[in-house]
Amino acid sequence: MPEPGAPGEGRGTERRAPPLSPADRAGLEAALAEARAAAAAGEVPVGAAVARNGVIVARAHNAAVARGDPTAHAELLALQQALAALGTARLSDGTLYVTLEPCAQCAGAIVLAKVGRLVFGAYDDKAGMCGSVGDLVRHPRLNHRVRVLGGAAERECGELLEAFFAAHRPTA
Ligand SMILES: [Zn+2]
């Protein structure tokens, strides 16, 4: 079974699309399915899933509109679900899959929950804090560093967002 730490990981902002292991492909597919469900519900299409020992233990999508809560991001909700489901306060042996590079809030939550590994689909040049605008999850001054595989499904995850925003753009 391929282990975390495969070639292409941990290289900072390098954006070459890496070959995905079957486990990573499955995790990203689960996150993508959540992102599509978000779009169908009128939410910004970002989805997330948490896996441990090859089993997906939580999945969620953006719920900012439904909850009237701008902090209800997919990866934050998935992390909270996973912590509750596993009855733990840390996810050092877990992998978080998310279709879009996490923002500052979610990158902070990833560090606090000591997530072992992060795999995200598309970079977010406007708000991403895992290699784009900044990098909280690999900050040299923080005491937890996350292994990161970024840009793992740039096209699929990015197109979903582009289509959503094209459809919701004001026509005036
Ligand atoms: Zn976020």
Image (spheres, helix red, strand yellow):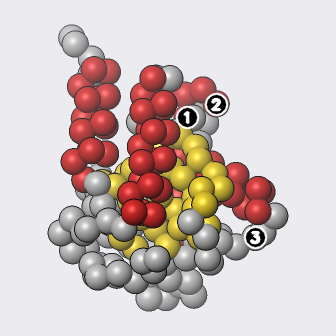
**Residue labelled 1 has its Cβ within 8 Å of some atom of ligand 1:** no
Q: Position of residue 32 (x, y in %)?
A: 41, 43
Crowd tier of the residue under label 3, counting other residues whose Cα lies within 10 Å: few below 14, some 14–19, many 20 or above: few
Residue that mark 1 sits on = 64
The residue type indicated by label 3 comes to Ala
Q: Position of residue 49 (x, y in %)?
A: 54, 53
Q: Please give the residue where the numbered disc 2 appears in the rendered image.
A: 67
Residue that lies at the very extreme toward the front in this rendered image: 1
Residue at image location 42% in from the left, 28% down from the top: 39
Q: Is residue 165 above or below residue 95?
A: above
Which is in the foreground here, disc 2 or disc 3? 3
Q: Residues within 10 Å of mark 1 (few under 14, many from 20)?
A: some
Nearer the observer, 124 or 27: 27
SS at circle 3: loop
Q: Amino acid at mark 2?
A: Arg
Q: Which of disc 3 and disc 2 is earlier in sequence?
A: 2
> What x and y, as percent, mark residue 60?
58, 43
Real-space Cα separation, disc 3 to disc 1, in angstroms: 24 Å
Q: Nearer the viewer, residue 109 or 50?
A: 50
Residue at left 22%, top 48%?
155
Residue that protrudes farthest toward the right in the picture: 87
52 or 89: nearer the viewer: 52
Relative vertical location of residue 22 with respect to residue 34 in this rendering, above or below: below
Ligand 1 within 8 Å of disc 2? The answer is no
Mark on residue 89?
3
User: Which part of the image, by quadrant, shows the C terminus?
Assistant: top left
Q: Is residue 53 above or below residue 11?
A: above
Helix, strand or loop under label 1: helix
Query: Depth-wise, is mark 3 or mark 1 nearer the camera?
Result: 3
